[in-house]
Amino acid sequence: MKIKATALFKKQVSALNQRNRRIIYEKIELLKENPYRYKKIRSKKYSRVFRIRLNIEQKETRLIYVVLSPNIILVCLLERKGEYKNLEKYLKQV
């Protein structure tokens, strides 16, 4: 499967420090091996939306991605606290 990223995701990752980028990169490597290993979340638009739990800068953060064969699309990084209400808006960018 091929990994692609939205412009929003690239912007969010570029704002992070090197240590946090490495954490995200390692998770993406695991994602390449098995994209279905992480928890599935509900979406009105897509049936295969998943999230990876991360702890970035002492904040509970989620990496949201969509599996659209043959691609895996990295959508965004969501802060766990109250950000899920914006999820559908971010998924429109896919």
Image (spheres, rainbow, N blue to C red):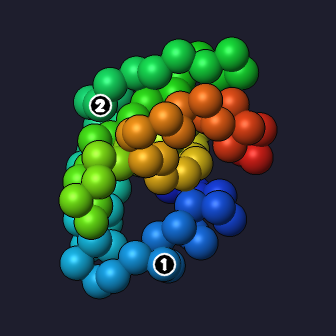
The relative height of residue 69 versus residue 79 in the rendered view (above or below) is: above
Check the image and name the residue furthest to the front: 82
The image position of residue 73, as x and y in percent, is 57, 47
87 vs 83, left or right, is right
**Residue ID at (29%, 31%):** 38
Residue 43 visible, this angle: yes
Mark 1 vs mark 2, foreground winner is: 1
Mark earlier in primary sequence (1, 2): 1
Circle 1 SS class: loop
Residue bearing the label numbered 2: 38
Disc number for residue 47: none
Q: Quadrant of the C terminus?
A: top right
90 vs 56, left or right, is right
Residue bearing the label numbered 1: 15
**Residue ID at (47%, 52%):** 77
Q: Name the one closer to the observer, 72 or 78.
A: 78
For badge 2, the amino acid type reads Tyr
**Residue ID at (40%, 76%):** 16
**Residue ID at (48%, 47%):** 78
The relative height of residue 54 versus residue 6 in the rendered view (above or below) is: above
For badge 1, the amino acid type reads Ala
The image position of residue 68, as x and y in percent, is 60, 34
Count all numbered tags in the image, as a single digit. 2
Circle 2 SS class: loop
Say whether marks 1 and 2 touch (CB < 8 Å): no
Distance in Å between CA atoms under marks 1 and 2:
25 Å
The relative height of residue 15 versus residue 7 in the rendered view (above or below) is: below
